[in-house]
Image: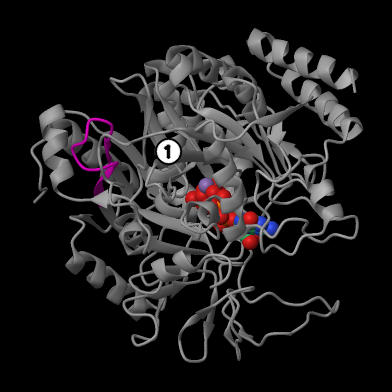
Amino acid sequence: MAPTTNKKLLNWVAEIEKMCTPEKVVWCDGSTEEYDRLMAEMVASGAAIKLNEKKRPNSFAFNSAPSDVARVENRTYIASVKQEDAGPTNNWIDPVELKKIMTKLYTGCMKGRTMYVIPFSMGPIGSPIAKNAIEITDSPYVVVNMHIMTRVSTEVLRLIEKEDYFIPCLHSVGSPLEPGQEDSRWPCAPIEEKYIAHFPEENLIWSYGSGYGGNALLGKKCLALRIASAMAGREGWMAEHMLILRLINPEGKKFHIAAAFPSACGKTNLAMLKSTVPGWNVETIGDDIAWMKPGKDGRLYAINPEAGFFGVAPGTSADSNPMALASCSKDAIFTNVVVTADKDVWWEDMGVECEGGTDWLNRPWKPGMKDEKGNKIKGAHPNSRFTARAEHCPIICPDWEDPKGVPIDIFVFGGKRANTIPLVHEAFDFEQGVYMGATASSEPTAAALDVDAKLRFDPFAMTPFIGYHAGDYIQHWFDMGEKLGDKAPRCFYVNWFRKTADGKWLWPGFGENSRVLKWMCDRVEGKVEARETPIGLMPIDGDLTLKDLDISAEDWAELMKVDTDLFKATLEDAKEYLAKLGDKLPAKLTQQLNALEARLAKH
Ligand code: GTP
Ligand code: SPV
Ligand code: MN
């Protein structure tokens, strides 16, 4: 019996069941019993590995198919009614056409499988800013991950009944089973059959063929960013690819910072920063997504719509991110890491020795193993991930679930740049801040397949997640600035990734980034002045403390250097990139561009 009386929901579930023809339908309730039952089933089928209960209590490891390891941007679509509404940064297919293609794929696609109906909320259940949704999926792996990443509960059904509204999210791994056919460990469809589709006018999500991360956990990138950004643009709020943290200074003053870095560029790390500045402490609110609305006092309030972290595993160590390690010390799911001989997990740069075990491709593996060409074989995939409960983060902010959200004082933009961009600079004003965010650029990472190996412009780290025209999206940022006026957050741009000519990091990064955040807070409080440069405001020597850091005067000079020639070159690239926005290029952006060009010309 379906646990709801809502006609809209019952009709939709019946319609999908008819199209996908699963063996059975299971309504999920988000309970521990449900989680344990599904995990036990997946361990029995061989899809999951139960980890050592003593070392990693209640935790499981999965290995995906080698072709299904990250987001697939080339297979991701914004199917708005008019192509111009999707803009130049999105793939587009006419929604009628796309539904035809996908209906064909969906027909009979759940044969031999269970269809799970997951009621979930993005944001604290029942809060005015939260969204109620249903994900239908034929992947039990998706169900258990949704348990951690979102709030799965029958309470959501009560809200759907009351409001007669939900966001429908349909997902299938696209791998029907014939009678007697043995299932694979990680069912999925070939790349050319994968579609991650969004119908923004209907607030509808259809995903087919992938079981991995943002392709399949539809609350995350599909709902909380692509659909939500389109809603936010229409309704006057913001849905951003941003971490949220609270920084408390020695006097107990709280600052709230939201930072946008592209995928695998340090959001999880910064969100859980262990401050190295005495007396300054960080509390984590979110590590990937921020929903922000102006409050009654005119300030911008942010919530984290998620309930867990889907974090990059490689590089996570007791040195780089002890809080992330603690968050996944129990009740966690690991995907595409090494399972050691004693059934714990390991990944590259975890900071501990590994004797060997099974790699992400399920092969026997030892550190130092090389392929035929003599290249080291990595045990964990570069985009391997842990799924961890936010509540297990030792420094989770006591207010992280406050439906009011936290008032944002500071926006930070950034990316991975080996040169050109200094460690930190501040915008003269909000409009220049929008320019900085809109022209942010980064070198590629492993978080998405099929991204060019060259520098990419990535406005607000949102390129793969803007659910509408990027020009309208940037204009929305200017509009929000106007609405917020002098209460708008102060804007900064950082680059932790600048390198020496011989390829070494110039900045130690990680916990030491707290020094940069402290300077930002001191700026907001008016405690320190800044020096004017053509690109923005920069620290006066001594204000950004380098005490006890082993960093030479030359390296510091290089880190803070504004190389006007390199900047001019980046500006030319930015112009070329922005030209793609056509007549949707905001006039204010052009003004900023011209003003920067004029300032650079004087140097
Ligand atoms: P998504 O979850 O994909 O959106 O990414 P994210 O921005 O949360 O990425 P994450 O924090 O997991 O960053 C992963 C990569 O950034 C790893 O390779 C880290 O080692 C590296 N990283 C993070 N912070 C720093 C830093 O301060 N300095 C340096 N050099 N590397 C960093
Ligand atoms: C990202 O790629 O930005 C992620 C991982 O946060 S995923 O959820 O797979 O999109
Ligand atoms: Mn992300």
- Give x and y (percent) for residue 480: 47, 17
Closer to us: 133 or 502: 502
Q: Which residue: 37% across, 72% down? A: 180
Quadrant for the C terminus in the image: top right
- On whether residue 282 falls in the magenta region, the answer is no
Q: Is residue 589 above or below residue 71?
A: above
Residue under pointer 1: 290
Residue range corresponding to the magenta coloring: 117-133
Instruction: Looking at the picture, tell me which residue is in the foreground, 171 or 347.
Output: 347
Q: Is residue 514 left or right of residue 15?
A: right
Q: Nearer the viewer, residue 218 or 281?
A: 281
Element marked by disc 1: strand
| Residue 454, above or below 189 | above
> Can you tell me whether the CB of the residue at mark 1 lies under 8 Å from the nearest atom of ligand 3?
no
Q: Is residue 129 magenta?
A: yes
Query: Above or below — where is 558 with respect to 479?
Result: below
- Viewer can see residue 104: no
Quadrant of the rendered image containing residue 389? bottom left
Percent position (x, y) of residue 332? 38, 69
Residue 437 can be seen in this image: yes
Residue 1 on image: x %, y %: 8, 51
Judged from the image, the quadrant occupied by ligand 1 is bottom right
Horizontal relation, residue 447 to residue 235: left or right: right
Q: Tell me which amino acid carries mark 1.
A: Ala
Position of residue 438 relative to residue 544, above or below, is: above
Can you tell which quarter of the image residue 57 is in? Answer: bottom left
